[in-house]
Image: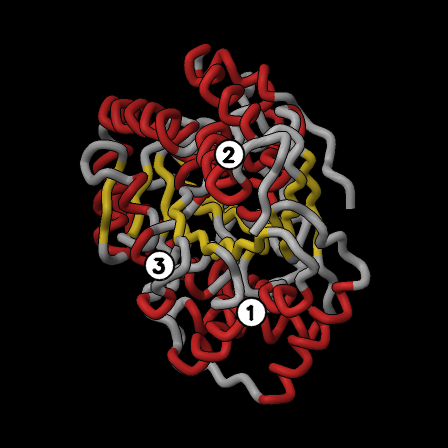
Amino acid sequence: MSSPSGRIIDEYEPIIGRSEMQEILELAERVHGARIIHVNSTMYGGGVAEMLRSLVPLANSLGLKVKWEVIEGDDSFFKTTKSIHNALQGNMNIEISEEMWSHYLEVNEGNVRKLDLEGDVILIHDPQPLPLILHRRGGVWVWRCHVDMSSPHPDVWARIREYVLKYDALVFSLERYAPGDVLGKPVYTRFPAIDPLSDKNRSLSVDEILRVLERYDVDPDRPLIGQVARFDPWKRPLDALKAYRLAREKIPGLQMAMVGSFAHDDPEGEEWYRKVKEEVGDDGDIHLLTNLKDVEVNAVQRSLSVALQMSIREGFGLSVTEALWKEVPVIARRAGGIPLQVIDGFTGFLIESPEEAAERAVYLIKRPWMARELGARGHDHVKRSFIITKLLKDYLRMHIDLVGLAPEIRIR
């Protein structure tokens, strides 16, 4: 699959400034013409696809030759890979049969004939396409893990580790996610990022926001809190609903938006959507919104008085990043990369329970001046650290490490 069309790097100069632009251009010149392949498991749904949708065309606009490939699989394959994902995030009750492992390998082998895997650097994202390394045909292979692997299921990790150790380098979202038994491998830390110019994050007019709220019957004259997340047990959507209902006892008329999406590589989504829908019942002030267009998610997020993120595991938490970019204070658990973004009492509040989340939400809704202050700080924090050009710059530095200098690109 060819790289999707998209914006060019020059469009970001008003946001990042000329000096940062010049640094990116100089780094890109050092790997000009390098051929980079990204492989993941879905084009739509989830933070990895969203990042690649911006990162790939931006890198191409700088003179690299970047492609984005997506593996294909059946329901059994994605059921297995979701089990692997959950096990790597710490679910100790996962059981993966030998038959499931065999099918996992077979599907990856079948994809080898369909994918372009010949490049200077091949970046494999997450567990789904991990075994492709068994069929390498040259180049530097890098595994980019977006999962919180701070306490993985030991048996599942032992199986996965066989493939991980065949890679030339590893990339994790946080340093503490890197298992201790991969010593000797180059390990990079790269924070995920949002695209401030995408439909999901660009500035919107008041009229655009109001049209979306009207479309989904959200009252713009009453306060709204919400959680944007996949329907997933790790995201704790029922805890978010509990926090809302507790807060509504203190703020009559409070509304809730539960915004979720389904990805074809996540078979648990439908099951958890049904659980959330059952819990919502006929409460007309809870808006259960699924698979919205990016601009619609943007409008809902910009309408929030407070954003919740009740996850107990997060690789990083890009929905937190999105809310902060829109100057919405975030109330969230201390999971994954969230504490890097939600600085307690400065860009939002870190909490431990739905009860505490409700208390903090009431506090901010009754003090809009405080919410505005925290939101403004959050926007500045994201601008400095978690936008797509920063990730692009970090990847360029990594590519320089891995392939050397253009035009004579040196491959191990």
Q: Which mark is residue 82?
A: 1
Q: Residue at x 59, y 35 (%)?
A: 55
Contact, CB < 8 Å: mark 2 with mark 3? Answer: no
- Please tell me which of labels 1 and 3 falls first in the chain: 1
**In this view of the protein, which residue sits in the foreground, 221 or 212?**
212
Q: Judge the density around disc 3: few (<14), some (14-19), many (≥20) Cα neighbours within 10 Å.
A: many
Q: Is 324 located above or below residue 73 in the figure?
A: above
Q: Is 268 located above or below residue 334 in the figure?
A: below
How far apart are the alpha carbons under marks 1 and 2? 30 Å
Residue 299 is situated, as x and y percent measured from the top left of the image, at 54, 30
How far apart are the alpha carbons under marks 2 and 3? 22 Å
Q: Residue at x 31, y 48 (%)?
A: 332
Contact, CB < 8 Å: mark 1 with mark 2? Answer: no
Residue 155 is situated, as x and y percent measured from the top left of the image, at 42, 82
- Please tell me which of labels 2 and 3 falls first in the chain: 3
**In this view of the protein, which residue sits in the foreground, 296 or 129?**
129
Q: Which mark is residue 160?
A: none
Q: Is 274 located above or below residue 385 in the figure?
A: below
Residue at mark 2: 396
Instruction: Using the rendered image of the protein, determine whether residue 17 is visible from the camera's viewpoint.
Output: yes
- Total marks shown come to 3
Residue 232 is situated, as x and y percent measured from the top left of the image, at 49, 62
Q: Residue furthest bottom?
A: 98
